[in-house]
Image (cartoon, rainbow, N blue to C red):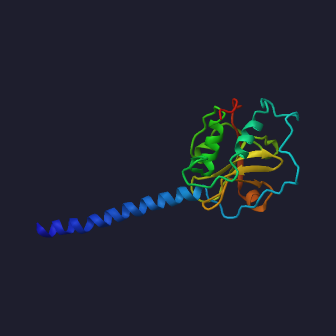
């Protein structure tokens, strides 16, 4: 009997270690979903604008995406923080999207793997400001997400140690990891 009790005591730490290791692996996978390896800065000529509200729009698009882009641009420089979804605490990629759209009265799911199933699929040649752009960075179900700003540029929160910024879809890294885009239903006015 005493031998069985001792065996149970020695197994308990092993089980705890397995549980801890499993939780650590899950956390690392979640971190990897919004981390990226090589982000280039957007190459936008000085004085260039992100789009012209008067240009011809896609059917059903009312130009409200420009307001979403303005809100996203206002977060540039905010530090990356895994699990973050506010300018005070920092943003991860999907937290940035979640916060920006919430400022416009639109509720989108929090994780990127759910955001990629929200809204309407959009072809790369049909991107409009405010569309969500997705990239497959790591194995598993995670995606990196950003907000298309127009003129081939998107706003995103890249990875730990970096800040919200603009990047160009034409950069080799982003072009090779691009998996698609979604258009979220037209947002309301910003609720700053």
Q: Position of residue 94 (x, y in %)?
A: 61, 47
Position of the N terminus, as image quadrant, is bottom left
Residue 130: in sight, yes or no?
Answer: no
Location of residue 91 with respect to 106 vertically, above or below: below
Q: Nearer the viewer, residue 8 or 157?
A: 157
Q: Position of residue 148 (x, y in %)?
A: 75, 45
Q: Quadrant of the C terminus?
A: top right
> Can residue 80 be seen in this snapshot?
yes
User: Would residue 7 be found to the left or right of residue 157 on screen?
Assistant: left
Q: Residue furthest left?
A: 1
Q: Residue at x 47, y 61 (%)?
A: 25
**Residue in the foreground of this view, choosing between 78 and 57:** 78
For the point 66% across and 33% down, the residue is 104
Question: Where in the figure is residue 61, as x and y percent of width and height?
Answer: 78, 32
Instruction: Give the image quarter of residue 65.
Output: top right
Position of residue 130 measured from the top left corner of the image (x, y, whole percent): 74, 40
Q: Which quarter of the figure has residue 18? A: bottom left
Label total for image: 0
Q: Determine the residue positioned at 60% across, 52% down.
A: 92
The quarter of the picture where residue 105 lies is top right
């Amino acid at each position: 009997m005493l031998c069985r009790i001792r065996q149970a005591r020695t197994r308990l730490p092993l089980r705890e270690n397995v549980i801890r290791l499993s939780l650590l692996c899950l956390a690392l996978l979640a971190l990897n979903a919004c981390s990226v390896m090589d982000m280039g800065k957007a190459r936008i000529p000085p004085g260039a604008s992100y789009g012209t509200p008067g240009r011809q729009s896609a059917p059903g698009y009312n130009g409200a995406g420009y307001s979403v882009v303005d809100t996203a641009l206002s977060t540039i420089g905010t530090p990356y923080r895994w699990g973050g979804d506010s300018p005070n605490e920092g943003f991860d990629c999907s937290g940035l999207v979640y916060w920006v759209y919430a400022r416009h009265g639109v509720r989108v799911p929090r994780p990127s793997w759910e955001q990629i199933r929200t809204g309407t699929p959009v072809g790369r040649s049909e991107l409009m400001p405010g569309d969500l752009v997705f990239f497959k960075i790591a194995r598993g179900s995670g995606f990196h997400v950003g907000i298309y700003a127009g003129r081939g540029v998107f706003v995103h929160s890249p990875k730990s140690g970096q800040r919200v910024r603009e990047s160009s879809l034409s950069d080799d890294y982003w072009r090779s990891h691009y998996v698609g885009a979604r258009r979220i239903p037209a947002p309301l006015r910003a609720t700053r």
